[in-house]
Image: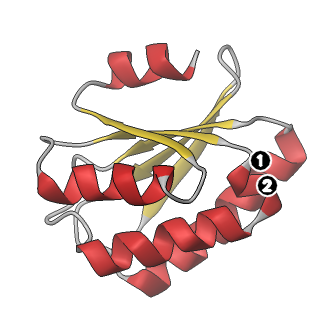
Amino acid sequence: MSIKISKLHRSNVVRVEYLAGSVTAADLAEHRARVVEILSESGFRKVLVCTESLVRFPPPLTALEHNEGLAAHDVLSAARFAVVCKDIGEDERYLEDSAINRGLELKCFTSEREALNWLD
């Protein structure tokens, strides 16, 4: 699974864009490592994750494991995550709930503008 990572310097946000396809637990682990690297070097603590191109949102178990990985890392657990989705259904709400239950700041949106406003 390919992703594109960029820095939005005006708002001190790391933007992670998932390109068309599906995402696996192994992909998410690799992506977490790349985001840690960028957050560590930049000092940013806000992450915008754009998932609209995914064929399918990760299933609940994968989302749970991903959130456990976020919470277990000092850099990631200190960050705030806004996730932009095609629509918000059960899987997206589960991602939010499992993040909150692990002490993470994560919220799903259907608009990048709303997500960026929340990150500010």
Neighbor class of circle 1 (other Cα within 10 Å; few <14, some 14-19, many 20+) is many
* Local SS, label 1: helix
What residue is pinned by disc 2? 75
The one nearer the camera, 62 or 48, is 62
Tell me the kind of residue under disc 2. Val
Which image quadrant is residue 108 in? top left
Q: Residue at x 12, y 41 (%)?
A: 87
The relative height of residue 68 versus residue 19 in the rendered view (above or below) is: below
Coordinates of residue 64 in the picture (x, y in percent): 41, 72
Report the Cα–Cα distance between label 2 and label 1.
7 Å
Q: Nearer the viewer, mark 2 or mark 1?
A: 2
* Residue 85 location (% of width, % of height): 24, 43
Residue 83 appears in view: yes
- Where's residue 5, x and y in %? 56, 49
Relative vertical location of residue 57 with respect to residue 30 in this rendering, above or below: above
Q: Which residue is mark 1?
A: 39
Q: Is residue 19 visible?
A: no
**Amino acid under label 1?**
Leu
Task: Determine whether label 2 and label 1 are within 8 Å by CB.
Answer: yes
The residue located at (30%, 50%) in the rendering is: 51
Q: Position of residue 2 (x, y in %)?
A: 41, 67
Secondary structure state at the residue bearing disc 2: helix
The residue that appears at 41% across and 60% down in the rendered structure is 98
Which circle's residue, 2 or 1, is located before the other in the chain?
1
Is 106 or 6 nearer to us in this picture? 106
